[in-house]
Image: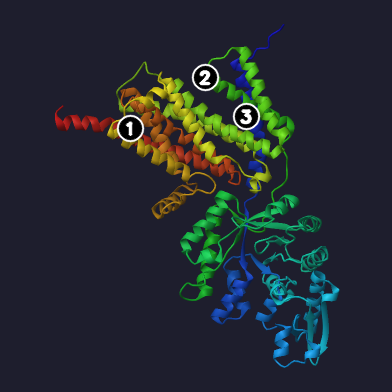
Amino acid sequence: MKKYRISRKFLIALFLVGLVASFYLLYLRVSAEVRNRVFSVSLDMEELKSVSAIEGVPLERVIDAFRKSGANAVSVYAFTLETLQREGKAIVFPGYEAVNYGWLKEKFNPAFTYVVFEDESLAKDVASALRSALGEKRVLLKACEKYAVMEVKKDLETLLEIPLGFSREEIRLLKGKGFKVFLRIKNFREVNRRYIKYIFDQMDSLGTNKVIIFEGEEVLGYPLLINDVADEMKKRGYIMGIVEFAKQLGKEELALKIFPQLLLVHSIDPNEMLTYTKGRAISRYLRAVKERSMRVLYLRFFLNCPGDLIKENAKYVSTVIGEVKHAGFRLGMPKPLPFWWIPLPILLLILLGVASLTVIVIDLWKPLSDHYKFVLLGLITLIYVNFYLERTLVFGNICLAFMVSIIFPIWGMSLILKKLNMEHVENRLGFYIRRFTEISFYPLLASLSAAVYIGGVLGEPLFMTKLFQFKGVKLAYLLPLIISGLLAFYNEGRKLREFLKEPLLKEEFLVFLVLMAALGVYLLRSGNFPLLKPISVEREARSFLETLLYARPRFKEFLIGYPAIALFLFLSYRGWLWRYRPLVFMLGTIAPISVINTFCHIHTPVLFSVLRTLNGFILGWIFSALLLFFLYFIPRAWEILTGK
């Protein structure tokens, strides 16, 4: 019986083919990102009205001032009975108040709600909206002297929240001033199919830019009529603005149904604005555009700042726009990302590439015969395929990306251990720096290879718009760290069990506590939503690095990861701290793990992530060279000073 065999060269060839296939997908993604460098700045219509009222300046003059600041869009809310009452266009009261105030009892029912209008045309529009929402029989419109009186068989509290339409006067004013108009609408309990069609007909008649940013804690139609809202949006060409960090029920479900008609929106909550300085808010908006591909900046005003609110906020808006433009973006009307799927043949090549590298890494530490390599490759491939067959294509891609985040940093660090030449050692500073430069390229190149694979397998608009995200961040941070540490023990011919049985001195116990504390901070600070937030000094350092380098490198890379690799190299060549070298090596694994995690943030543009990685490597090299300098010269200086 013929035995099937597979050589390491063939595995490397499969890996390279998978890399090329990933490059093709990465090209599609980068092309889309390069074209997607247009951003819009939207103001809030209600805040424009608030500033107008506070400063006692006509609304039109306020709008002119902010148009000159550079803002190109305004988000307009659907008005409600509460809005009309606040603006003096209607009086809303429960029936029992009408009775108490001396109105004729036979004309008013205490259980109903009554609305009084002076404008008969407005009354008819409101009646049409409420009949769509509540039904014909629950809304009665009648004349009473010179007023139009509406009787609604509905309690006052929930009636006040029903969106009734949009002010045509406001929209005409904004469009006349050159603003793009985005629409805001909220959900309510009685929403139905008739109302959904009615409100979309109303929105169609306004001639806006067809961008909807849903208001409140739910999207329109939640929970039972999301399909109807999605059908109307797709049929009529509406785009959904997804507000980053906003917790809205039904947001992801609706976004998936209308995909790819989506725009990413970033805003700071009005309550949060009370704690922000202008500089911090500007940095946050700039970071949202550069690092997370937000294309609509929904700016909120500083309503508690001293001085003229109009001038101060117009200057703030102008500064935000100037900073984003300076970063290489263009003000205009952004468009949704184009849609594409990963072709299955290309996905299969990527899958085989990951599987082949997995076999290569295992073979590095446990040499396998060609026969067993073939069996192992087939087994790993079948496991990956099972992820796709058992669940969805997206789930399979996430699992594959997770495996990349585990295998590739282990591969890069394994190459350091295998390529560390202990035969020719020169006790010169230049030698240490040169050797560190050489070996640090192994984890860097492994990380960049992982970036290509992950960027390919997750580089779809579904991930770029954050509808799906990389899963298993904590494990991806922890597993390569532990495995690399164990491999370092194994490489020195030691066993972890024996290491743990060795007596621990007090000084060593303190070192152990420091390492455990560092590991805890490392994990708490990792992930999409870290439990431990940066302190103020770190935030200032981040801002400085962003200004200096455009793409801020991660502290854990250039302050911990790369210097730990340099320290491991120095200790290995000098024969120092033999007991703790594997732990130092384990800390060095933070560098490739962090680099790979950078590319797992698919909403971050690839070229930005590449620049961040290179900045991290350069700064890491500088700090590592300084560390080697001190490690080399401090003992010599001590010998000179002590005469030993």
| Image position of 254 with respect to 621: above or below | below
Residue at x 78% of width, y 86% of height: 108
Task: Name the quarter where the C terminus is drawn.
Answer: top left
Amino acid at circle 3: Leu
Q: Which residue is mark 3?
A: 19
- Which comes before the other along the chain, label 2 or label 1? 2
- Which comes before the other along the chain, label 3 or label 2? 3
Q: Is residue 299 left or right of residue 441?
A: right
Measure how far apart labels 3 and 1 are at the Cα level: 35 Å
* Disc 3 packing (10 Å; few <14; some 14–19; many ≥20): many
Q: Secondary structure at mark 3?
A: helix
Q: Secondary structure at mark 1?
A: helix
Residues 593 and 289: in front is: 593
Q: Which residue is mark 2?
A: 364
Residue at x 36% of width, y 31% of height: 567
| Image position of 341 with respect to 237: above or below | above
Q: Residue furthest left?
A: 643
Tell me if I can see residue 452 in this picture.
no
Look at discs 2 and 1 and give the one toward the viewer.
Answer: 2
Cβ–Cβ under 8 Å for marks 3 and 1: no
Q: Which residue is mark 1?
A: 628
Q: Is residue 302 left or right of residue 424?
A: right
| Image position of 604 with respect to 582: above or below | below
- Which comes before the other along the chain, label 3 or label 1? 3
* Disc 2 packing (10 Å; few <14; some 14–19; many ≥20): few
